[in-house]
Image (spheres, rainbow, N blue to C red):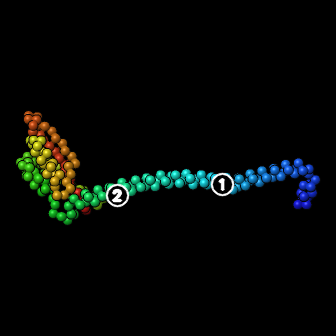
Amino acid sequence: MMPVLKERWRQLASRERTILGIGGAVVATSLLFLAVVDPLLAKIEKLERQAVRKSKERVELAELAAAYATKQARVAKLEQRMPPAAGQFSLLAFLEEAATSVQLRDRIVGMQPQTPTATQGYQETAVDLRLDGIQLPQLLALLVALEQAPYDVQVHHLQIKPKYDNPVNLDATLRIVSYAKA
């Protein structure tokens, strides 16, 4: 087969040989491009897109890490103010002492402890406190006493209604919550 091709090549005119040589070079170049260069370009484009995406993910991960560190510091700060799990802190007794210290003990209509709930390693203790016929400065004094508690005590719900007969006097309902490690 090869000798037949060589004989035909010799019989071609120089212009035909040039045309066939250029055509062969174009075909070889096209095959090289399709077999090698095009897949490499596609792979480079894909890697560039992945690099951009990974860069965005890295920035997002850095932001999440910073937010996580901030929240961990906040949790650590709150845990420092929590009473120990086996401690002697009683939210009910503390509320009675706080009400006594601001002269509101006689205004307590109801103090109802709620069932403690444990979630994610913390025990939540809640007490519903109802006060009748108090004035705003007395309520504010009680809230300040709660804020200055030795442990973290939070007011989750506060409802204030003025008395119908004397709007200076108020009825207040508070849900006070304390957390401890379970």
Q: Quadrant of the N terminus?
A: bottom right
Residue located beneath label 2 in the image: 69
Expressed as whole percent of the image width and height from the top left, the position of residue 113 reads 17, 53
Q: Position of residue 165 (x, y in %)?
A: 8, 34
The amino acid type, in three-letter code, at marker 2 is: Ala
* Rendered residue at 32%/55% (across/down): 71
- Toward the viewer: 166 or 35? 35
What is the x, y in percent for residue 99?
A: 10, 51
Answer whether residue 61 is visible to the viewer in this image.
Answer: yes
Q: Residues within 10 Å of mark 1 (few under 14, many from 20)?
A: few
For residue 39, the mark is 1
Q: Quadrant of residue 167?
A: top left
Say which amino acid is labelled 1.
Pro
Q: From the viewer's perspective, is 92 left or right of 58?
A: left
Residue 88 position, x and y percent, is 15, 63
In the picture, residue 91 is in which quadrant? bottom left
Q: CA distance from mark 2 to mark 1?
A: 44 Å
Q: Is residue 2 positioned above or below 14 on the image?
A: below
